[in-house]
Amino acid sequence: MSTVTLPASSASPALAAPATLSGPEGRRAFVMSHLPAHCRGLEIAPYFNPMVDRSKYDVFYVDCIDNDEIQRKAGDNPGAVGRYVPRIDAVWVPGKRLAECVEGRKFAYAVASHVMEHVPNPLGWLNEILECVEVGGRVAIMLPMRTKSMDYYRQNTTFGEVVGWSIEKPALPTPTQVMDFLSQSFYHRGEPVIEGKMPRFEDAPRHYSDKDALNYANFVWNEKHYLDVHCSTWTPETFKEIFGRLRDVGLLNCEVIGPFVGFPGATDAEFLAFLEKRA
């Protein structure tokens, strides 16, 4: 089994940042400076905002939908107007192992930016990614903070839920996940979410009514339909606690590095963590 040796700069516990860049480029540079970027990497769901720039790095892109569907989706997304949408190299077919979809390729690192919260079985998903990463390699995970996002009024995902989903292995967001997201999220226009200054949930703007949420939950169950929702919610504290417990009970073979907030180019509503694969 091959092993990745990280560059010396990647081993710094302080995760020192490149000092010359800010904004989105600073964000990318910070993440890449703490990965073995000189080797081949994997990015999950780059869409129109890839973290790993193919013109600079040797990267393999995968998504759960094919290139035609990605282009159609981007065409309907106002945020994608004028943005470059790279072609993916393989489709991670729902219900099929990632290792099979990438034809047994191994990677020195993997990146998933604002993807895991959409996954109905986050532990199973991560273990499939780790299966494709060499020992010593890292998986970079970026997630929205529940307390700073449209998930503000929802409860934190629990250790028990993550383990339960790994046993049930849902391939699609479950009615419970759909119901919780649609009935407890609020219509977020991008304004700052400030603890202690938010209105009561009853007074917050809603994108979906409880009746809407119920109808969608029944629809996804009856029609076996994929509805893109935040299946799980995270804060830096709950991520560290839950993934530490998953490691301790032998369900995740990696070390948790971080999480980190306030790094160059990051918004105040996201955080970053690395999972380093153990032998």
Image (spheres, helix red, strand yellow):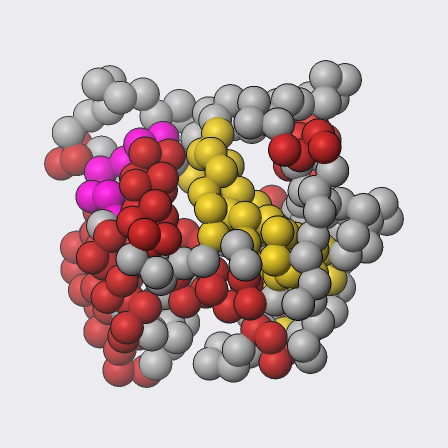
Can you see residue 124?
yes
Can you see residue 234?
no
Instruction: Classify residue 156 as left or right of residue 47.
Output: left
Q: Position of residue 38 (x, y in %)?
A: 81, 46
Residue at 61%, 58% in the rendered image: 135
Q: Position of residue 259 (x, y in %)?
A: 45, 34
Magenta-highlighted residues: 147-157
Residue at 47%, 64% in the rendered image: 127
Residue 150 inside the magenta-drawn segment: yes
Above or below residue 66? Residue 158 is above
Q: Quadrant of residue 87?
A: bottom right
Above or below residue 30? Residue 111 is below
Q: Position of residue 136 (x, y in %)?
A: 61, 51
- Viewer-proximal residue among 238 and 46: 238
Residue at 66%, 23% in the rendered image: 17
The C terminus lies in quadrant: bottom right
Residue at 57%, 73% in the rendered image: 98
